[in-house]
Amino acid sequence: MDFSSKLLENAVNEMSQLPGIGKRTALRLVLHLLRQPESQTLQLSQSLQKMREEINFCRRCHNISDSELCEICANPNRDGGLVCVVEDIRDVMAIENTSQFKGQYHVLNGKISPMDGIGPGDLNIPSLVEKVKSGEVRELIFALSSTLEGDTTNFYIFKQIEGHNITTTTIARGISVGDELEYADEVTLGRSILNRIPFESSLKST
């Protein structure tokens, strides 16, 4: 792709590093920004910079937050003894959109994937295990995607907390095997949360 401007080329190259954005799409986006008022483009860049510099991660659940505790963990009406284990913030948003879950979350920030060089130590698993050991959690809901990596992560955590007085469940398989939670429709995901099953039962069925 030939560019008449090095500045344009640099902007397109940076934009194309975003997930799902190829060079042609990046070019369309950059040209669109050029056609907008300068104030709008500056507002976008300032918003991104402010987010990058000031955003926090909840000290309790590792969700993205503006403060030390996210709004969910800080909400006294949420059930702190019911914890849903998810891969990342997109899954939190997907489940929250169902309005069917009234507990709290624990964001792992990924899942175990030896092929990608991601082990248990790279995830927020130790803090989850400590949370269970402290006795503040009565039920842990595994809500990772139904993939080999997701199932491996679920099983690893299950073995780490085995022997503690806690109920472990997994979302019902209304979510197709291999599907990511963020792409599930709200009704199906909501029913999967409500109709969750004991985690041991999911082990027997695989």
Image (cartoon, grey):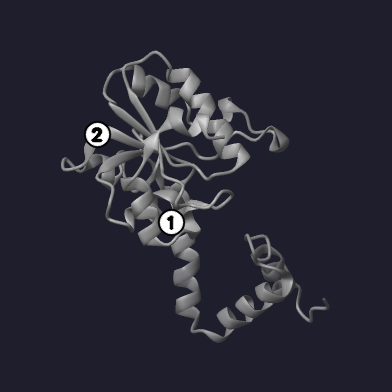
Q: Residues within 10 Å of mark 2 (few under 14, many from 20)?
A: some
Image spot of residue 2 (x, y percent): 83, 78
Residue sticking out furthest to the top: 163
So how many labels did they put on this image?
A: 2
Q: Is residue 140 left or right of residue 144?
A: left
Query: In what element is the residue under mark 2?
Result: strand
Residue sticking out furthest to the left: 77
Q: Nearer the viewer, mark 1 or mark 2?
A: 2
Residue sticking out furthest to the right: 2
State whether residue 164 is above or below residue 85: above
Image spot of residue 145 (x, y percent): 52, 45
Residue 169: quarter of image: top left
Q: Residue at x 49, y 19 (%)?
A: 159
Closer-to-camera residue (74/104): 104
Q: Is residue 13 left or right of residue 35?
A: right
Image spot of residue 106 (x, y percent): 39, 36
State whether residue 37 is above or below residue 195: below
Q: Amino acid at mark 1?
A: Lys
Q: Quadrant of the N terminus?
A: bottom right
Query: In what element is the residue under mark 1?
Result: helix
State whether residue 49 is above or below residue 57: below
Whether residue 190 appears in this view of the structure is yes
- Mark seen at residue 131: none
Closer-to-camera residue (187/85): 187
Image spot of residue 76 (x, y percent): 16, 40
Closer-to-camera residue (179/55): 179
Residue occupied by mark 2: 80
Residue occupied by mark 1: 50
For the residues labelled 1 and 2, the Cα–Cα distance comes to 31 Å
Q: Amino acid at mark 2?
A: Gly
Q: Residue at x 63, y 60 (%)?
A: 19
